[in-house]
Amino acid sequence: MANAAKHPLQKPPGYRDPAAPPLAVPKPPPKKAQLPPAFRYPGKPTRQHRIRRSCSRRICCGCCFAFLAIVFLLAVAGGVSYLWFRPMLPSFRVENVTAPVFNLSSRSDGTFLDASAIVKIHASNPNGKLGLSYREATARVAAADEDGDVEVGTGSAPGFELGRRNSTVIWFAAAAKGLMVDDAVGGRLKSRFKNSEIRFVVEIRTKVGYVINGKSTVKLPIRVKCSAVSLKQIGSGRSLPKCNLDFLNGIF
C-alpha cells in the first residue's frame, strides 16, 4: 500500500494559478456613429417633412378653393349683369361720301392720282341701359377696282360718347397726292368717276367700351368694314346697307 502511486489532486473548475501571467481582456468593438433619421431610413420622410408637406397641401387646397369661389362669383355676377343690361353691339352705316377732287393724269412715266374724299358714317347705340364710349377712330378710304382697291388715304376722328338709344355722324377726310396707279386701273376709275359709278370702300378701326353710371368699362378694339358704295347709290337717297363689325379681327 505504501508503494502505491500517488495521484495529484484535481484543480477545481475556475482555478487559476497565481503565478501565471494575467490573461488579456478583449476590448469591445467600437460603436458605430449614430446617423440622423433621414440617413438611417432614406425612403421614410421625417416628422418635420411630413408636417411641412401637410401644411403645403392645405395651403394649396385653400388657394384652389378660393380661386374657384372667385371664378364662380364672377360668373354669377356677369350672368346677372348680362340679363339686366342686355348689352348690344353698336351699328354703323355709310351716310354720305363725296369726292371734291379726283384727277387722273397720264404722263410718260405713268398714271398718277390726286384725290380727296369726305366720308360720313352714321353710328348708333341700340342699348337702352348702357352708353358707349369711343376712342379716336381711324378710317381708311379706297376706290374699289377689280384688280385691287386703290388707296385714297386715311382720316381720323376724335373720341366721343353716345348716350342710351342715341346716334351721331362721324366725319373722316382722306386725301392722296401723286399716287401712281396702273394705267388700265386709272382708265377705269376715270371713266367711272365721270358716270358717278365709282365705288368707295371704308374701313374704320377704333376702341369702344360700355358706359355704366358715368364710368366706362375697358375699351376693346373693333374693326368696321363698310362694303363698296357708289356715288350714284348715295345720290339716290336710298338707305345704304349697314357696315360689318368685327371684334376679334379688330385686335390685329
Image: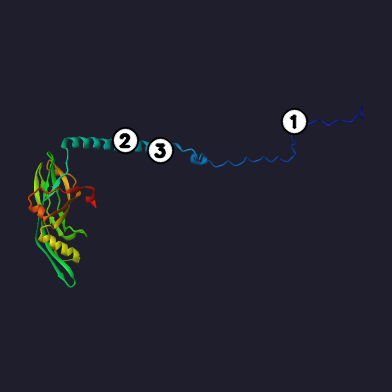
Q: Looking at the figure, which quarter contains the N terminus?
A: top right
Amino acid type shown at disc 3: Arg
| Mark count | 3
Residue under label 3: 53
Alpha carbon separation for disc pair 3 and 1: 65 Å
Q: How crowded is mark 2: few (under 14 residues within 10 Å), some or many (20 or more)?
A: few
Residue in the foreground of this view, choosing between 53 and 202: 202
Q: In which quarter of the image is residue 141?
A: bottom left
Front residue of 137/126: it is 126
Residue located at (16% from left, 49% from top): 243
Q: Which residue is drawn at 22% across and 37% down?
A: 78
Of the two numbered discs 3 and 2 in the rendering, the one whose residue sits closer to the viewer: 2
Residue 61 is marked as none
Instruction: First in sequence, mark 3 or 1: give its number.
Output: 1
User: Can see residue 175?
Assistant: no
- For the question of whether residue 114 can be seen, the reply is yes
- Verify CB contact (< 8 Å) between mark 3 and mark 2: no
Q: Name the residue under label 2.
A: 65
Q: In the figure, 61 relative to 207: above or below?
A: above
Q: Mark 1 points at which residue?
A: 13
Q: Is mark 1 on a helix, strand or loop?
A: loop
Crowd rating for badge 1 (residues with CA inside 10 Å; few <14, some 14–19, many 20+):
few
Q: Upstream in the sequence, badge 2 or badge 1?
A: 1
Q: In which quarter of the image is residue 69?
A: top left
The alpha-carbon separation of the residues under discs 2 and 1 comes to: 82 Å
Q: Residue at x 46, y 38 (%)?
A: 46
Badge nearest the viewer, 3 or 1: 3
N-terminal-most mark, 3 or 2 = 3
In the structure shown, which secondary structural element does the residue marked by tag 2 occupy? helix
Say if 136 sits above or below 71 in the image: below
- Say what secondary structure mark 3 lies in: helix
